[in-house]
Image (tube, grey):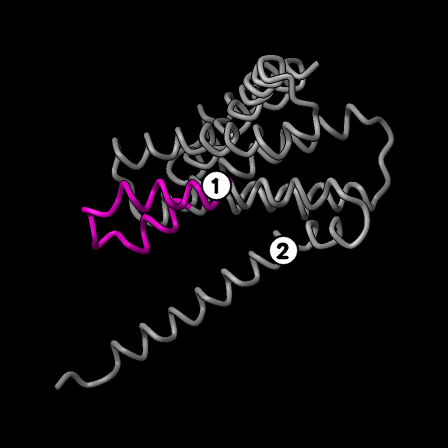
Amino acid sequence: MAESFFLCIAAPLAVALLFTSGGARRFCIFFLAGLTVCLLCAYVGGFLMAVTGYSLDDAAVYITPISEELMKMAPLLFYYLVFEPEDRHLLGAAAALGAGFATFENCYYLMSSGSATLEYVLIRGLAVGVMHTVCTMAVPMVLLLFQGVKHMTGVLMVGMMAVSITYHGLYNLLVSVPGISRAAGYALPLCTVAGILILSRVRKKLLAKYENEPQS
């Protein structure tokens, strides 16, 4: 079923690549990459569950965050190291890949569960979907933020990957427990996005203020 669902979404995107260019083509490529990574993660996650003997809930906390974040980062690192894209292109690629991953996962879960309430649909879109996009964009954002210290690139990548994996695992752990913990987990991605937007806005204002100040 997952393969059929993948083909239904991926085929139109693959055709669209023939008629697009520039930013539109880049978005389609990485959205398609996100779909592909999500499908591969399902295979890898199932294999690791069989090997370790973990239950589905345990795998969601101990296995899934590691496998998914590492596999999502592979296409971005290849793009970053080989093509050396502009900052906005790298961030756009990360957002497209995260959105593609979240789209495939959300739609597959909705199809598998049958009829779903509007509340469940909104949670899948605004919580799980945003969480995947945030985790995917974390490493590129740190790389761009500290691009002036090239000798620290490897350390920053490993450190931010650890943060992304921990964040993903924390989200899965929170939503696995009914009650206030689940509500906190659902709110976590949106609060994170709000914090990132606020910090980005403050950073731009500070940079603009610094550039406008007369140099002594």
Q: Is residue 7 left or right of residue 75?
A: right
Q: Position of residue 30 (x, y in %)?
A: 46, 32
Query: Which residue is found at the position 46% from the left and 27% from the top?
Result: 71
Distance (Cα) linking label 1 and label 2: 15 Å
Q: Earlier in the sequence, mark 1 or mark 2?
A: 1
Q: Nearer the viewer, residue 81 or 20?
A: 81
Q: Quadrant of the C terminus?
A: bottom left
Q: Nearer the viewer, residue 62 or 68?
A: 62
Magenta-span inclusion, residue 199: no
Magenta-span inclusion, residue 164: yes
Residue where numbered disc 2 is placed: 190
Binning the other alpha carbons within 10 Å of mark 1 as few (below 14), some (14 to 19) or many (20 upward) gives many
The three-letter amino acid code for the residue at tag 2 is Leu
Binning the other alpha carbons within 10 Å of mark 2 as few (below 14), some (14 to 19) or many (20 upward) gives some
The three-letter amino acid code for the residue at tag 1 is Thr
Query: Which residue is found at the position 66% from the left and 29% from the top?
Result: 58
State which quadrant residue 82 falls in: top left
State which quadrant residue 18 falls in: top left
Q: Indicate the secondary structure of the residue bearing disc 2.
A: helix
Residue where numbered disc 1 is placed: 136
Q: Position of residue 155 (x, y in %)?
A: 29, 44
Magenta region, mostly helix, strand or loop? helix
Write the start and end of the magenta stretch as one range.
139-165
Query: Extreme left residue here?
Result: 216
